[in-house]
């Protein structure tokens, strides 16, 4: 069975920065789970391909007024991490939201993407 590689995880992150949902979904397993960094739980959990795709679209729209910046990635067997940030201007001030994703892999695909973020209090 193929394994997730650093190159593939970086390709996923590049697709996220471009907002390419079709490409993102090509990395996901059929039983995928996305745990977003914002929502009522805290965060919000999406399970299954259709729900995860909708969750990706929702989250990308949520941060759509910001510039996406990638960060370090690592693949550790069936687990992975990726750092990221979004930067936007707010009232003449540049605000950066930083976060990270924790991934669980099944072979060379993503089974779970669990996102965490740090935000500034205005």
Image: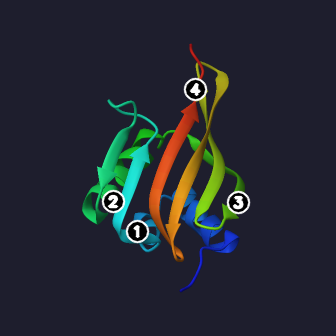
Determine the image quadrant of residue 26: bottom left
Q: Residues within 10 Å of mark 2 (few under 14, many from 20)?
A: many
Question: Percent x, y for residue 59?
Answer: 41, 45
Left or right, 117 with respect to 54, comes to right
Tell me whether the residue at label 1 lies in contact with that at label 3, contact meaning CB atoms closer than 8 angstroms.
no
Location of mark 2 (residue): 53
Which-is-in-front pick, marks 1 and 3?
3
Left or right, 10 with respect to 42, comes to right
Q: Earlier in the sequence, mark 2 or mark 3?
A: 2
Residue at 56%, 84% (x, y): give it: 2
Q: Earlier in the sequence, mark 4 or mark 1?
A: 1
Q: Earlier in the sequence, mark 2 or mark 1?
A: 1
Location of mark 4 (residue): 119
Q: Earlier in the sequence, mark 4 or mark 3?
A: 3
Which-is-in-front pick, marks 2 and 3?
3
Question: Percent x, y for residue 9?
Answer: 61, 66
Q: Which mark is residue 74?
A: 3
Location of mark 1 (residue): 25
Question: Percent x, y for residue 114?
Answer: 48, 48
Q: Residues within 10 Å of mark 3 (few under 14, many from 20)?
A: some
Determine the residue located farthest toward the top in the rendered image.
122
Separation of residues labelled 4 and 3 (CA atoms): 23 Å
């Amino acid at each position: 069975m193929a394994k997730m590689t650093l190159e593939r995880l970086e390709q996923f992150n590049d697709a996220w920065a471009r907002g390419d949902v079709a490409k993102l979904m090509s990395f996901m397993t059929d039983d995928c789970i996305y745990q977003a960094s914002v929502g009522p739980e805290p965060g919000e959990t999406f399970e299954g391909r259709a729900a995860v795709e909708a969750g990706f679209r929702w989250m990308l729209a949520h941060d759509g007024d910001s510039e996406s910046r990638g960060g370090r990635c690592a693949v550790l067997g069936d687990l992975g991490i990726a750092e990221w940030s979004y930067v936007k201007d707010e009232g003449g001030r540049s605000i950066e939201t930083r976060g990270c994703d924790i991934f669980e892999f099944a072979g060379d695909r993503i089974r779970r993407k669990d996102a965490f973020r740090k935000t500034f209090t205005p």
